[in-house]
Image (cartoon, helix red, strand yellow):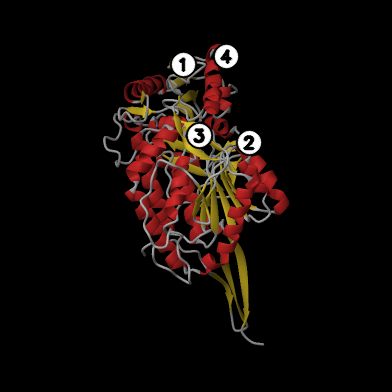
Amino acid sequence: MSPAATTNGLTNGTNGVNHKLQFEKYYNIINNELTTTAKTRHNINPATTQSNPEVPVSTQDDVDKAVAAARAAFKPWAKVPVEERGQRLRDYADAIESYTDDFANLLTSEQGKPLAQSVQEIGMATTWLRAFSTMKLPENIIEDNEDRQVINRYTPLGVACGIVPWNFPILLAVGKVAPALYTGNTLIIKPSPYTPYCDLKLVELGMQFFPPGVLQALSGEEDLGPMFTAHPDIDKISFTGSSATGKKVMAASAPTLKRVTLELGGNDPAIICEDVDIEKIIPTRLPEEPTEPLPTQLAIVSFLCCSQICMMIKRLYVHSSIYPKFIEAFCAHVKDHMKVGPGTDPNNFIGPVQNSMQYAKVRDMYSQIAEQGWKPALGGDMPNEDPTSKGYFFTPTIIDNPPDDSRIVTEEPFGPILPILKWDHDDEVIARANDTKMGLGASVWSSDLERATGMAKQLEAGSVWVNSHFEVAPGIPFGGHKWSGIGTEWGVNGLKAYCNSQCLWLKKRL
């Protein structure tokens, strides 16, 4: 359907005109109007430390206006047939795809990841929108006899808020937009203060496809998230971020009994068995074209996006019988093929850490190499204390068999530093892999599928892979165990997370 189409009296906020999206100025989107604020701020390009454009700094009044608009839009939007809601999502995906180059350049300038990885993220986002637009929420007939029929069905919650992190701002925003809107909810996106630009433009583009109040976005500072979690007229918070902040989101949502979905941090282990083909699981090349899918071999799923992904491998356990050969080959590949530098250079695979806060955290982890006597198998150079002239870059570093109780093993660095550890017995390595408060992802690599599957089933994580890692798909639920989250996103489970469960009792005779 075109942006000019209407259903049930609903129209978009652009009077049917397909406006060309401009990428020079950035606004809040409230009730399909572009608004700004008295105070503005800007972020920097983490590769160059040069300033990006100004963005609004939202206030409580902005939040109240957006929530009121979302509440007013909710019931009319929920009455739109699900088929049309799906069609609008597909049209929205087509529009995003038409701006791939613009969004990719913007994403690299604000997040830092290489352009090829930015293009990959945009492609995933459009895939997610199209996949959700055809999913089916089940209506299960639980009981059906001469006396009555009982149906379990799902109804939208109301007004939702999606709090988006800075590592994958496009995909993880769309991963909330698609299920929320498809199930008949309205949604307010709150981008990370570090990466507001793409999300503001995504929602501005959405004005051409969704009625006023259905999809909105507010940018702001660190105090904006608590305004949403405390707001009495928001029904659902979907948060992606750190476990520490997730606990605060959950506590702040409790007084109003908001539904919450929390996708939090990870400390993913990968277990490498002695029967693997090292040359196959450590790739010899990277994709030559931006549209070529990234393989899921070990080096890539350890250092993709400068290791700033919750489901990157954070602990690599290698059987002692192949350990020397493996670590030599792994280090050689990272050194030869994973160049560091600005994401605008197609030869670079590892861009900068995204922001000054994370730079300080990762730098502190690098400082432990000398202080704790860790042995670097690769890298280990201490970066500059002041990165403002050269960008937030780190040399990829591999730590050779550190103690299990060292910080590089027990904490999530969220930067390009990786421990490789020896193991000897299956039960031993499974216990070590599970010895963490986190439980987002894990993997086992072996040519013996039966053995690997048996080991994988014992790992305490929401996603467990055999002979791959960090494979995700829109139709497959995604969430964590333990401190890595509550609930799941994506798939039919992700649709249900934006709904109330209702049992409809139909008495056939009075």
Residue tagged by mark 3?
42
Q: Amino acid at mark 4?
A: Gln
Tell me the quarter of the image containing the N terminus: bottom left
Q: Amino acid at mark 3?
A: His
Q: Which comes sooner in the sequence, label 3 or label 2?
A: 3
Do the residues bearing badges 4 and 2 touch, measured as CB atoms within 8 Å? no
Q: Position of residue 278 (x, y in %)?
A: 35, 28
- Front-most of 69 and 345? 69
- 162 vs 351: above or below: below
Which of the two discs, 4 and 3, sits closer to the camera? Answer: 3
Q: How far apart are labels 1 and 4 at the CA level?
A: 13 Å
Q: Which comes sooner in the sequence, label 1 or label 2?
A: 2
Q: Position of residue 40 (x, y in %)?
A: 54, 38
Q: Which comes sooner in the sequence, label 1 or label 4?
A: 4
Which of the two discs, 1 and 4, sits closer to the camera? Answer: 1
Tell me the SS state at disc 1. loop
Outermost residue, bottom side: 510
Look at 46% across and 41% down and name the residue there. Answer: 197
Tell me the SS state at disc 3. strand
Marker disc for residue 446: none
Q: Position of residue 28 (x, y in %)?
A: 52, 47
2 vs 169, left or right, is: left
Do the residues bearing badges 4 and 3 touch, measured as CB atoms within 8 Å? no
Q: How far apart are labels 3 and 1 at the CA level?
A: 32 Å
Marker disc for residue 372: 4
Mark 2 surroundings: few (<14), some (14-19) or many (≥20) residues within 10 A: few
Marker disc for residue 380: 1
Tell me the quarter of the image containing the C terminus: bottom right
Q: Which comes sooner in the sequence, label 4 or label 3?
A: 3
Look at 66% across and 40% down and name the residue there. Answer: 248
Tell me the SS state at disc 2. helix
